[in-house]
Image: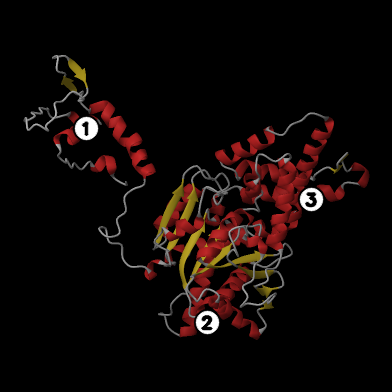
Amino acid sequence: MWGKLIPLLLAVPSSIISPASKLVEETRSLYKDLNSRSPVSRNYSPTIRFDFVGPRANDTSTWRDFHVHPELGPHISKDASDASDESIFERVAATHGSTKPLLIYLPGLDGVGISASMQFDDLSSSFEFWRLSISKSDRSTFTELTNAVASFIDDVATKQDREVLLVGESFGGLLAPSVAMRVNAKVKTRQGAMDGENPIKGLVLVNPATSFDETQWSTFAPLLWTLRHLEQEMDADQVVKTSTGRFPTLYSVIGGMALAATIPDAKQLQRIVTMFMDIPVTASEDVTEILGNMRDGFGILGSELPPAVVEHRVGQWLPVGSAVVNKRLDKLDVPTLVIAGLDDNMLPTKKEAKRLSELMPNCQKLEIKGSGHFILDDRVNLTQLILDSDLNPLKQLSKPYDPIIDWKSPSAERIHEAIESRVKPLRALTSPVFYSTDKNGRRRMGLSHLPSSDDGTPLLFVANHQFGKTFLCHPDLHFLNQRLSISIIVRFASIYSGT
């Protein structure tokens, strides 16, 4: 929900000398890129804009390289008030031959989407990808923010006769339904009838803040932002300083601790703790460096989400948005996918996903086990989740699946997984024990002493019915099939389903 520093924690290699220093440096650099205006962007107020995220120029580049397609020209950003700017949407679509579907990402309360930045490269590869960016100085109301996004969709989709997929994370997951309702109302007004088509063909809500009214953040957050008043009352002589500079503010420390307690899931927290436990401390200078990095890390929260910003966004956007959106969700008939981290400690997302899937007319949920509020890390591929869902805008471009022609053999990994997790336990519990007799009349374990059928001598195989009907699960049956030169086909749906 708030701007998250966790993505950079997880992206820092463990082999570098000073992971803490690298973390701080990379976090600042990423925020700088996220806050910077893209060469292809559109303003809808002095503090609200949409940035086009182009695909990677090559295998070694990323979205942060700000590659501009030659057809677009350099630095062509315009304001929404400039009529000549409308051609930019046609020019962007021309770079991919209008083959890519539109996708718009709405961030959490940090306004730039640092928590989803790991997904930008893949999203920009499969979609014409635009992202909302909100300045720290913005003081728009929730309604004004909704109208700005709706106006952008009107320009980029409705006027261009294109469909769009709207992805909202955390607060963006609360804003997205509001935008869909507003766009739907605008389309109906323009058409003058009730049959106007909403260009938003799908919503993807990632840990949506539609459950804000079920949390205690409305009580805790005001206590957090009032800490700035204590800091303002402190005299210069009272400011605590260290050898590395000024000590972090109460707001940044307590706020950082609150985020650390609610954002990471168990695996993320383990990786973070392991990283810092591996930092060598051999001298007082090492301790000083660690403390300095901690100060700088807490300072990032204070600079990117200062108390006044948190006060406005938590105090105005979330309660107003919850009141406006929740009472209308049962009438929002837009295909919706709710992606829920089951270990979300910031919002009651598991419960909320169930509520939304039952309340909204056309909604399905996708639960991610082991993931918390920061769900869009390197363990999840948002692009693939969308393409694998019913919202996939590319499905209409492909032929229907043929279970015969299009069937593919499961991979060796999936077969091995099925054998290990399903076949072997049943084999150990229910399969028979096989014996054969050698030429000397002694019984041997297994079927290796069965006589050959090459000379035409008939071979009699006697077996009894086995509990659980898993007789053919035994590995010696493969040997038996070879010796008898026959094929035995048996279907065990309970074992091999999904492979």
Q: CA distance from mark 1 to mark 2?
A: 68 Å
What residue is at 49 percent from the left and 60 percent from the top? 204
Foreground: 125 or 411?
411
Q: Which residue is mark 2?
A: 159
What amino acid does circle 2 point to?
A: Lys
Count residues near mark 3 (Cα–Cα under 10 Å), then give few for <14, some for 14-19, many for 20+: some
User: Residue 89, percent across and down?
Assistant: 57, 78
User: Residue 165, percent across and down?
Assistant: 49, 67
User: Residue 356, percent across and down?
Assistant: 44, 56
Foreground: 460 or 1?
460
- Position of 171 with respect to 341 (left or right) is right
Residue 179 visible in the snapshot? yes
Mark found first going from the N terminus, 2 or 3: 2
Above or below, comparing residue 165 to residue 445 in the picture = below
What amino acid does circle 3 point to?
A: Arg
User: Residue 484, percent across and down?
Assistant: 14, 35
Residue 301 visible in the snapshot? no
- Position of 460 with respect to 120 (left or right) is left
Q: Can you tell which mark lies on residue 67? A: none
Above or below, comparing residue 186 to residue 5 in the picture = below
Q: Can you tell which mark lies on residue 228? A: 3
Q: Which residue is mark 1?
A: 479
- Which of the two marks, 2 or 3, is nearer to us in this view? 2
The reply to whether the C-beta atoms of the residues labelled 3 and 1 are less than 8 Å apart is no
